[in-house]
Amino acid sequence: MPGPRHEWKHEIDLADRIAIRQRLRAVAQTDRHAKDGRYLIRSLYFDDRSDKALREKLNGVDRREKFRIRYYDRDPSLIHLEKKCKRGGLCTKLSAPVSQREAQAIVDGDLDWMPGSGRALVQELYHKMRCQGLRPRTIVDYTREAFVYPPGNVRVTLDHGLRTGLRCVDFLDPDCVTIPAGDAPTILEVKWDAYLPGIIRDAVQLEGRHACAFSKYAACRIYGV
């Protein structure tokens, strides 16, 4: 299991994004998976009948988790099931690959294959879908610009263009309509292990900006069921 990581989030505007991008290009490396410095992310988030994940996020519950399925740049040949946990301000993410067929089966509610998948995270999702009523709730699309800085295992992302799939949860459907999620800001995220190097701290510093708890999932849920 990967160790827990520190995480900062800041809501920023377009001018901030341009300034921070220029600073990061001078001191950090562009994510090697990015094309022209950016890539598209599509995620499908899960929640239970009582919207537990949404309520815990909005209420600032210290110990919480959420499940999602994700792929990049409209290419579903590589899909991951992810579980993100937050404990005491530290974040941990677990991941397992799923095929297009398996992802579609989950969306369709065809779950019988999951216990025999041989992947613990898939089996955990199965248990929670069966016992807790977890189910697909919202598609979340956005553009990401990502930078890495090896000392401290730092990753900085600039996420913008947030869109929601409304009531559509078939995230493999290329014709699924998405719309802008209101006036969602750019989200600056900084993640690191034991320490955050000063050169990165300086690069992302913005006067008058404070850490926030913005949730892309919550921002998109207001348009869904």
Image (spheres, rainbow, N blue to C red):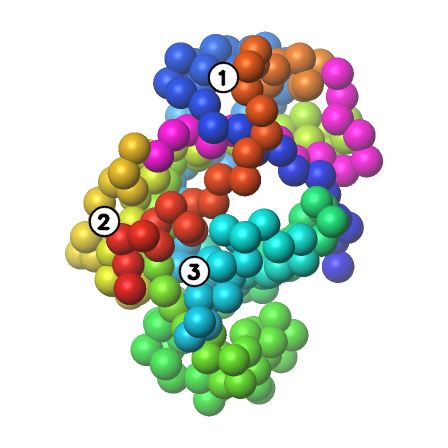
Badge nearest the viewer, 2 or 1: 2
Mark 2 or mark 1, which has the lower sequence index? 1
Q: Residues within 10 Å of mark 2 (few under 14, many from 20)?
A: some
> In the rendered structure, which segment of residues is drawn in magenta?
184-198
Q: Check disc 1 and report its element: helix, strand or loop.
A: helix
In terms of image quadrants, where is residue 160? Answer: top left
Could you say which is closer to the camera, residue 34 or residue 140? 140
Position of 88 compared to 214: left or right? right
Which residue is label 2 attached to? 178
Q: Check disc 2 and report its element: helix, strand or loop.
A: loop
Please say whether residue 204 is visible from this viewpoint. Answer: yes
Which residue is label 1 attached to? 21
Q: Check disc 3 and report its element: helix, strand or loop.
A: strand
Q: Amino acid at mark 2?
A: Thr
Q: Residues within 10 Å of mark 1 (few under 14, many from 20)?
A: many
Using the numbered discs, state the Cα–Cα distance from disc 3 to disc 1 in whole angstroms: 28 Å
Question: Mark 2 and 3 residues: CB-CB less than 8 Å, in contact?
Answer: no
Position of 185 compared to 55: left or right? left
Q: Amino acid at mark 1?
A: Arg
Q: Position of residue 205 (x, y in %)?
A: 61, 15
Mark 3 or mark 1, which has the lower sequence index? 1
Question: Mark 3 and 1 residues: CB-CB less than 8 Å, in contact?
Answer: no
Using the numbered discs, state the Cα–Cα distance from disc 2 to disc 1 in whole angstroms: 27 Å
Which residue is label 3 attached to? 45
Instruction: Please tell me whether residue 182 is drawn above or below residue 202 in the rendered image.
Output: below
Q: Residue at x 61, y 70 (%)?
A: 121
Q: Quadrant of the C terminus?
A: bottom left
Q: Amino acid at mark 3?
A: Tyr
